Amino acid sequence: MNKFPLITAHTGCMGHPDHSYESLQGALTLGADIYEDDIRSTRDGVPVLAHDDDIPLADGSRGSLAEMTLKELNAYLSVPIPTLQDVLEQIREASKIMNLDIKTDSALEPVSALVERMGMTEMVFLSGCNYGTAVNAGRYAPHIRRLLNVNIQSFGSLRYDDAMFQACTEALEAGCFGLNVPYQVVRPELMEAVRRNGLDLYVWTVMEADDMRRLAQWGVNSITTRDPAKLIAVRGEMEYAEENRDWTIN
């Protein structure tokens, strides 16, 4: 059997709110290998956990995260927004890895500076990077590894082989260590292509046990899920089956 994929807990895992310390703690308690969350930065360049720039404020109005300082933002929120620094301190204490899903190129420089200042370049990597963002990351965060988020549309508009070739070529040109792919487009031939090119294959966001088993059998490098407990159970089942396989030839 292939080595079981790294278990990546998606933000909001196990029913906890997205971008919350509860979600992070849930993932760490379960023993996930990697924790994934979305990253943006405030007007004063503080990386925070957030998917969208437009955020609801405590008074019912909405604000732009990029146009507010961290102090201003927290003054209008009922609960302070988690900062990347606070989360990375917990990641470091737990000796885990964090997948930083970059939602805007403006976060690249402050994220790079923070990670380097904390000495955590080996404990994080970037995702959320299309080809242009991946190239920019090579300039602003050259010391941080990065995945290429594949152009999903290409897998619908091109022949599958051509879409695979394009994805691998763009990843290599942008200096990425692998592809970040929605699991629905993965086939064994994509797994073979990334291996030929010396790349890794990370897949998201998988919720059903049958899909987890299939992808693990194909040899993907990481599976992202909001239900890491289920993925951990699948790993246990597959390891038990491998250890107890009957090799007797009749």
Image (cartoon, rainbow, N blue to C red):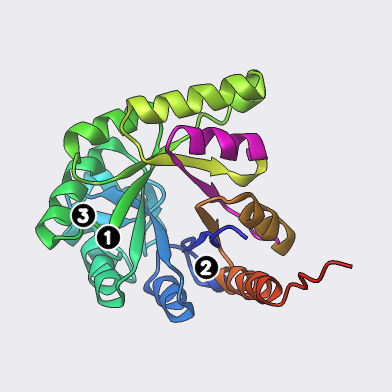
Does the residue at mark 3 contact the one at mark 2 (Cβ under 8 Å)?
no
Residues tagged 3 and 1 counted as in contact (Cβ below 8 A): yes
How many C-alpha atoms fall within 10 Å of the one at disc 3: few (<14), some, or many (≥20)?
some
- Disc on the earlier residue, 1 or 2: 2
Q: Amino acid at mark 2?
A: Cys
Amino acid at the residue labelled 1: Met
Task: Find disc 2 in the rendering and name its residue.
Answer: 13
Circle 1 or circle 2, nearest the eye: 1
Spot occupied by residue 65 in the image (x, y as percentages of width and height) = 29, 49
Residue positioned 36% across, 41% down in the render: 177
Q: Earlier in the sequence, mark 3 or mark 2?
A: 2
**Which region is colored magenta?**
185-208
Quarter assignment of residue 172? top left
Q: Label 3, on which residue?
A: 121
Please identify, in this view, whether the residue under mark 3 or under mark 2 is nearer the observer: 3
Residue 123, numbered circle: 1
Amino acid type at circle 3 is Thr
Q: Is residue 45 above or below residue 194?
A: below
Instruction: Classify mark 1: helix, strand or loop.
Output: loop
Q: Secondary structure at mark 2?
A: helix
In the image as oriented, which residue stretches furthest toward the front?
250
- Please identify the quadrant where the N terminus is shown: bottom right
Check the picture and name the quadrant holding the C terminus. bottom right
In the image, is residue 97 above or below residue 157?
below
Q: Position of residue 217 (x, y in %)?
A: 65, 55
Q: How many marks?
A: 3
Which is nearer the eye, 172 or 208? 172
| Mark 2 Cα shell of 10 Å, populated few (<14), some (14-19), many (≥20) | many
Snapshot quadrant of residue 124: bottom left
The one of 190 and 241 positioned closer to us in this rendering:
241
Secondary structure at numbered mark 3: loop
